[in-house]
Image (cartoon, rainbow, N blue to C red):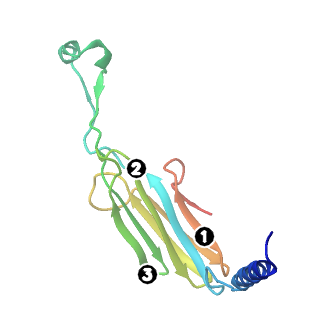
Amino acid sequence: MISPLRLAGQAAAYLVFIALIGYGTGVTHTHFPPEKALIKLSFTHGAARTTDCRRLTADELAKLPPNMRRPVECARGRGAVFAELIVDDEMLFSASLPPAGLSHDGPSRVYRSFVVTPGRHRLLIRLRDTPRSSGFDYTREAEVELAPQQNFVIDFRPEGDGFIFR
């Protein structure tokens, strides 16, 4: 049989626990300021290979085991992707994004967020995925109107125009 003193102690402990949970849920937390907007640059893209593929000769193919006979040999390595994001003539992001993987043959990845003031902004996003040292392979410029607490996402797909604004 449980003593009345023990029951009263358990009830008091439960009440304290419930009060702490109730107090904790009453605390407000603002994850993102209501007077700001967010631009997210997020994409995964593989640059061009660092060396060109070459066609194997008949003698080279004959020396290979039957299960390894491919007419074209390609090196695995890829180059870095270079990207820039300019908002209202201010450079927010400029980076050379290395390829992923142990053999440097995977895609380059970026996920960055930039807090900006709401309103009209002029965006310029550029990307280079070829071995050249200057110029860009993809460029997109646009004027956008950002609302308070809006998440504006910039994605990239090489087919079509390249950059996608969402």
Quadrant housing the N terminus: bottom right
- Along the viewing direction, whichever of 113 and 158 lies nearer the viewer: 113
Residue ID for mark 1: 152
* N-terminal-most mark, 2 or 1: 2
Sequence-first disc among 1 and 3: 3
Residue nearest the observer in this picture, 130 or 155: 155
Mark number displayed over residue 90: 3
Mark 2 or mark 1: which is in front? 2
Residues at circles 2 and 1 in contact by the CB criterion of under 8 Å:
no
Does dot 1 land on a helix, a strand or a loop? strand
Tell me the quarter of the image containing the C terminus.
Answer: bottom right
Residue 47 appears at what percent x and percent y? 37, 49
Q: Residue at x 62, y 83 (%)?
A: 118
Q: Is residue 63 left or right of residue 18?
A: left
Q: Nearer the viewer, residue 18 or 30?
A: 18
Query: Does 41 sit above or below residue 11?
Result: above
Lateral position of residue 140 relative to residue 103, left or right: right
Provide the residue designation for mark 2.
107
Say which quarter of the image contains residue 117: bottom right
Amino acid type assigned to the residue bearing label 3 in the image: Glu
Q: Is residue 43 above or below residue 37?
A: above
